[in-house]
Image (cartoon, rainbow, N blue to C red):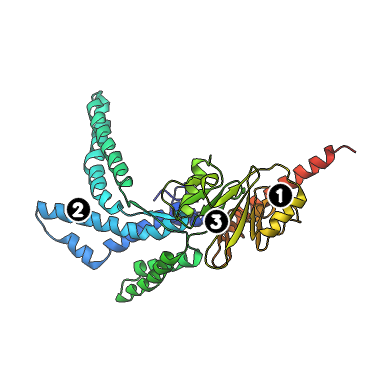
Amino acid sequence: MQETGGRGGEPGYVLLVWPESLMGPSFQLSFAAVTAIVALHDHPAMRNWAAMDLGWAGRAARFLAMTFLTGLLIEFTLMPIALHHFGKAGLYGALANMIAIPLTTFVIMPLEALALLLDLVGIGAPFWWLCGVAIEALIDVAHGVADTPGAVALFPRSGAPVFALFVIGGLWLFLWRTCGRWLGLVPVAIASLLAALQPAPDLLVTGDGQHVAVSAPDGALVLLRRRTGDYALQSLSESAAFQGQPIAIEDWPGARCNADFCSLVLRAGEPSHRVLIGRSRERVPERALAAACRRADIVIAGRWLPTSCRPRWFKADRALLDRTGGLAIYLADRKVRTVAQGHAGHPWWDRAMALRQAAREKARAERLSTRPR
């Protein structure tokens, strides 16, 4: 396989030179798919089926059936990885592959080879045109499947323990060749149940504090800023397992907003939680801000808040977010999950944090050096 987190080569070489690739979704998806294919076609039943002497109709039916079974196994194998990293997974890939794989194998690739060969004598253009038509058909299949209702399943992202159960169970199933391999279904079943029961976060905060998403009691997704970019909107929607059109916080009747802050009350069990969310970087009188913080359970802002701002439970300002990255807040059990929890201790995160701190200290020193005396 060549697709290994953007770096080609054998898996042993990749892990030796770039061990961090193991943590990337590209590496995990690529080699999980290969492992699943090898395990399936190494099974005695599959080998015996492949060795059967059949007529042309039987061979065609066997090819389609094997294509479907392989695609189905790959879908189930990759689903936990996709859900862990992206909070979503495709459901119709096995059916799409029944069209895409034969189209690629028996139409597109032979046409490309023939066009390249005929280009030597300058008559390959008609076959390139036919190849383009076939590729357009392949793209249409992909778009058609993607646009089908229910093609993508969204789930709240589960933690590392759930993902570890999926990995352990999958490796047990694929690597053992005896009947004991089916014991791998036990951790897979437990992980599936835990993933299905994982609640969606009540509040999502991006690492810079500029974007906040609220899971409203009526099922809507409420955004702090009306003009949220496509990337931030997609990330927040996927993390909240929300499919639909979000609404701006000023259009939601459950919030009261002015130019600087929005105040809202969220109920996730008992008691309710009063949330104060900053919208601007304009200076606010400290005494009024401190009073508003005392009345709130949670305060969120993309700016530095003074120490006099002390909410009853949790404060997420620029000082905290610089250390934690994005946040997912669960009100029912008063739990906060941070991006740093999954990355702290890894070289790429620690170095990024060190560089950010060095840049902050340099900027502070420059401000002090230019301050009038």
- Labels 1 & 2 near each other (Cβ < 8 A): no
The residue sitting at the left extreme is 55
Q: Position of residue 127 (x, y in %)?
A: 23, 30
Picture layout, residue 5 above or below residue 135? below
Which one is earlier in the sequence, the residue at label 1 or at label 2? 2
Q: Residue at x 29, y 55 (%)?
A: 71
Across and down, in percent, residue 49 comes to 18, 62
Image quarter (top left, top right, bottom left or bottom right) of the C terminus: top right
Q: Position of residue 264 (x, y in %)?
A: 58, 54
Give the labeled residue for mark 1.
304
Q: Which dot marks residue 203?
A: 3
Q: Residue furthest right?
A: 373
* Mark before the other along the chain sequence, 1 or 3: 3
In depth, the one of 221 and 363 nearer the eye is 221
In terms of depth relative to the viewer, which is nearer, 265 or 240?
A: 265
**Mark 2 element type:** helix
Which residue bears the numbered disc 2?
Answer: 64
Residue drawn at x 25%, y 33% is 133
